[in-house]
Amino acid sequence: MKIAMIGHKRIPSREGGVEIVVENLSTRLVKLGHKVTIYNRKGNNVLDKNIKTKKIKEYKGIKVKTIFTINKKGLDATIYSFLATIKAIFGKFDIIHYHAEGSCVMLWLPKLFHKKVIVTIHGLDWQRAKWGRFATRYIKFGEKMAVKYADEIIVLSKSIQKYFDDTYKRQTIFLPNGIEKHKIIDIDIIKKKYNLIKGGYILFLARIVPEKGLHYLIEAFKQIHTDKKLVIAGGASHTNKYFEQIKELAKKDKRIIMIGFVQGKELEELFSNCYLYCLPSDIEGMPLSLLEAMSYGKNCLVSDIEENVQVCRDYLYTFKRSNVNDLKDKLQQLLEDNNMYSSDDIQKYVLDRYNWDNIVKKIEDIYIDIVENKGDKYGKNN
């Protein structure tokens, strides 16, 4: 099949979960013999200005098209999704696969040309605090377009599946993200750069945006008694005001280290050698960073929202969402606990449950089912 991917920022990139998913899905579809074209947004990695995105035409067997856009909040995604959709309509694709709700505003266009369209909802993006009133309404409109026009909708959590059923009476397919096995490596780069030692720090690794709840973690950490450090890894992504607030909070405690966006061996070392991974988020789709931490066999403390708990409820520690006091107490307990979950047990559980190859094969089956359906569904179960 010929397949188009629309809705991510850039591949290769770790700018967000959508980018990681699109790369993993696309590379595996190519290995299965399909022809995949991804539509990248023009521009540089917004999380690290030192990482330059080259205008590439091919990546790991994937055909790459770069779409012009304006790097300005509110315009970036709108211009990109419109132009990418126009190009995809005339690309003779069997399937156009949209990712994230905002890009789905354009779904009516390929349906005018009787194209087969599938959507993956990575999260209810209109809930995110970084968006203003107009952007929130725009994203919510994209959600409604997905409900009306998509041949199939994939969701990453049971709670989002229930939302679509309750709100729109629209059937969706629950299919979580996958993860790869990661080799645990010795500490080197992060010792030289940040003076970190194995097991000597708690790790937060995510975009620094309000819905990730980093402010709760900093407030809680400042109240606990420990010689361990709190390492904050991640970039801002359209939330500079919040990012400045976080820097102001962090500088009041010398144990807190902000290291910005990381990738490659430095990222692998951070996961491999942390004592605990913490994700205090208020909103999630399906947290890939949590899957990654557990694929390294790490114990994790997360907010008790369903999207977090669902990932690995048998091997997670949780605290009450948005509750700094409960987070403080749980952190202190885990720092004093010498009998946490076994690293091997965590790793085996998450890798058995979230296998990328199995997940991509299921997506391939969905594609085949849509393509072989001779009629145009125009949003079945609408």
Image (cartoon, rainbow, N blue to C red):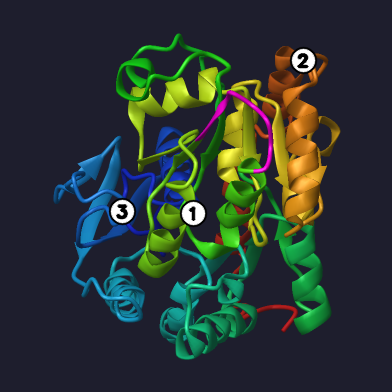
Mark 1 or mark 2, whichever is nearer to me: 1
| Magenta range | 223-230
The answer to whether the residue labelled 1 contacts the one labelled 2, judged by CB atoms less than 8 Å apart, is no
Kind of residue indicated by mark 3: Arg
Kind of residue indicated by mark 1: Leu
How many numbered badges does the structure rendering display? 3
In whole angstroms, how far apart are the C-alphas of marks 1 and 3? 31 Å
Q: Which residue is mark 2?
A: 342
Kind of residue indicated by mark 2: Ser
Q: Decide which of 335, 49 is in the foreground and name it.
A: 335
Q: Decide which of 327, 105 is in the foreground and name it.
A: 327
Q: Is residue 179 visible?
A: no
User: Can residue 21 be found in the magenta stretch?
Assistant: no
Q: Residue at x 53, y 18 (%)?
A: 273
Q: Is residue 343 left or right of residue 162?
A: left
In whole angstroms, how far apart are the C-alphas of marks 3 and 2? 36 Å
Please report whichever mark, 1 or 2, sits nearer to the chain's N-terminal start. 1
Q: Is residue 294 left or right of residue 195?
A: right
Q: Which mark is residue 249?
A: 1
Q: Position of residue 210 (x, y in %)?
A: 54, 64
Please report whichever mark, 3 or 2, sits nearer to the chain's N-terminal start. 3
- Give the prevailing secondary structure in the magenta stretch: loop
Q: Is residue 231 visible?
A: yes
Q: Residue 157's quadrant in the figure?
A: bottom right
Q: Position of residue 262 (x, y in %)?
A: 36, 36
Q: Which mark is residue 10?
A: 3
Please report whichever mark, 1 or 3, sits nearer to the chain's N-terminal start. 3
Q: Residue 302's quadrant in the figure?
A: top right
